[in-house]
Image (cartoon, grey):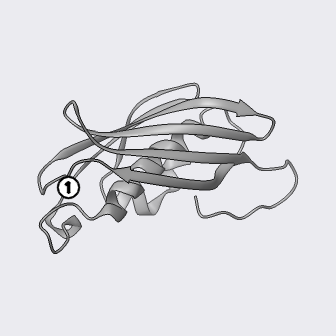
Amino acid sequence: MLEADRASAALGIELVGRGEGAATCRMRVTGEMVNGHGTAHGGYLFLLADTAFACACNSRGPVTVAAGADITFVAPAWEGDELRAVAQERVSYGRSGLYDVTVLRGEQVVAEFRGRSRTATPGRQEVAPS
């Protein structure tokens, strides 16, 4: 799935760890990702977290998409920072799942993301943003 993700590839996002229901991705903040305040734009932080979420919820094989997500920004990130997004499944029930993703700069928390997933019905085409 990640190999076909052109948006994540364009930002240099790499999958650096994975397991069942878990994934870790990293990204370096570039000058193009900085907002008018000189900090990383929240949309890029969300995209990094969403990519780790997608890798975690697709780690078992069936096609799984985002049903919704939200993020809380805790601390700024700056140009040149290397960020890690650590995703972990909290619970899955039927075709639905709940995942938490922590975005870190070193050991400092930058953002907390919670994603809700939905596994696609076999034989049906479902379209979702992730």
Residue 57 lies left or right of residue 15; in this view the side is right
Q: Position of residue 21 (x, y in %)?
A: 58, 29
Residue most extreme to the top: 19
Residue 97 lies left or right of residue 39; in this view the side is right
* Label 1: few (<14), some (14–19) or many (≥20) C-alpha neighbours in 10 Å: many
**The quadrant where residue 11 appears:** bottom left
The residue located at (52%, 41%) in the rendering is: 55
Label 1, on which residue? 29
Q: In the depicted view, which residue is nearer to us: 15 or 110?
A: 110
Image quarter (top left, top right, bottom left or bottom right) of the C terminus:
bottom right
Residue 85 lies left or right of residue 97; in this view the side is left
Residue most extreme to the bottom: 36
Number of numbered discs on residues: 1
The residue located at (14%, 66%) in the rendering is: 31
The residue located at (65%, 52%) in the rendering is: 65
Q: Position of residue 122 (x, y in %)?
A: 85, 47
Q: Position of residue 53 (x, y in %)?
A: 51, 43
Residue most extreme to the right: 123
Q: Secondary structure at mark 1?
A: loop
Residue 67 lies left or right of residue 106; in this view the side is right
The residue located at (32%, 62%) in the rendering is: 42
Q: Amino acid at mark 1?
A: Val
Q: Position of residue 121 (x, y in %)?
A: 84, 49
